[in-house]
Image (cartoon, rainbow, N blue to C red):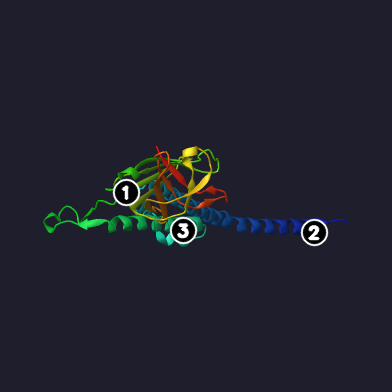
């Protein structure tokens, strides 16, 4: 079809109008996109910072510095925990806080008041755990029995005279806890025959029970006894993979 000059002019004018209209629309778009992008960047940056805080607080918790861990957590604005993308941070925040508070509460229960004439220094001072005074043979360093099992992370266990417990693991982590000891007449407790150096199981009569409260609030009981070869042994008495024992420790 042949297009006349007048029609070409009309067509050109229409195209110019459309172009101007499109240009006008594009003026607002970059601004809105920039604003949205800036907001998203700020949100991502804030989340990254709070994730770093969680990581630092977790390390302090693992190291047994519960008060410092809580102080680190205070850098996070609790209101932010309900924001989009904060699901994991929120869960870890409250889990860590709960773990720190439980252990600090345990420590506080073992505290005693300071006389009023010394009140200017501190309101409480940590009491001493005397439960191990008559059971020194059960304090010290222990090695995990059957540590050649690649599925187990346990390596060493240390019980101090004040009840402080540290479990060092093969992966570089450590668990911290607080223990008390008491006499026990538990019989038929599952353990290994450590005097043979094998994984042959046996049942023992316990001499003592050591109750450990770990920093995450969990509790665990070890039964202590003297093996036939004279070594001091701890066992949790729990089965593992049907024919093994969950945790057995021999004094180093």
Expressed as whole percent of the image width and height from the top left, the position of residue 3 reads 84, 56
In the image, taking residue 9 as reference, residue 172 lies left or right, namely left
- 108 or 149: nearer the eye? 149
> Which element is circle 1 on?
loop
- 40 or 194: nearer the eye? 194
Look at the image and tell me whether residue 33 can be seen: yes
Q: Quadrant of the C terminus?
A: top left
Query: Residue at left 47%, top 62%?
Result: 82
Is disc 3 surrounded by few (<14), some (14 to 19) or many (20+) residues within 10 Å? some
Query: Residue at left 29%, top 45%?
Result: 161
Confirm or deny contact between disc 2 and disc 1 (CB under 8 A).
Answer: no
Q: Earlier in the sequence, mark 3 or mark 1?
A: 3
Q: Residue furthest front?
A: 228
Expressed as whole percent of the image width and height from the top left, the position of residue 198 reads 52, 39
Which residue corresponds to mark 3? 90
Residue 117 image-quadrant placement: bottom left
Which residue corresponds to mark 1? 163
> Which element is circle 2 on?
helix
In the image, taking residue 196 as reference, residue 61 lies left or right, namely left
Kindly report the distance in space between the C-alpha atoms of the residues bearing marks 2 and 1: 98 Å
Which residue corresponds to mark 2? 7
């Amino acid at each position: 079809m042949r297009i006349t000059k007048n029609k070409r002019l009309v067509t050109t004018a229409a195209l110019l109008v459309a172009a101007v209209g499109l240009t006008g629309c594009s003026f607002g778009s970059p601004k809105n996109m920039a604003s949205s992008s800036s907001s998203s960047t700020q949100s991502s940056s804030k989340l990254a910072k709070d994730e770093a805080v969680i990581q630092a607080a977790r390390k302090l918790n693992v190291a047994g510095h519960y008060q410092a861990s809580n102080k680190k957590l205070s850098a996070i604005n609790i209101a932010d925990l309900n924001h989009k993308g904060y699901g994991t941070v929120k869960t870890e925040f409250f889990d860590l806080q709960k773990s720190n508070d439980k252990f600090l509460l345990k420590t506080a229960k073992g505290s005693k008041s300071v006389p009023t004439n010394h009140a200017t220094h501190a309101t409480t001072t940590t009491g001493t755990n005397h439960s191990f005074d008559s059971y020194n043979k059960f304090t010290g360093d222990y090695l995990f029995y059957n540590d050649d099992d690649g599925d187990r992370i346990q390596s060493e266990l240390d019980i101090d005279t004040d009840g402080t417990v540290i479990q060092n693991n093969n992966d570089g982590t450590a668990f911290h806890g607080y223990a008390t000891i008491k006499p026990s007449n538990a019989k038929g407790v599952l353990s290994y025959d450590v005097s043979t150096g094998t994984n042959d199981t046996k049942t023992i009569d316990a001499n003592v029970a050591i109750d450990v409260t770990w920093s995450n609030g969990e509790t665990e009981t070890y039964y202590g006894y003297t093996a036939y070869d004279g070594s001091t042994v701890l066992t949790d008495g729990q089965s593992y993979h049907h024919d093994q024992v969950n945790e057995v420790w021999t004094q180093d």
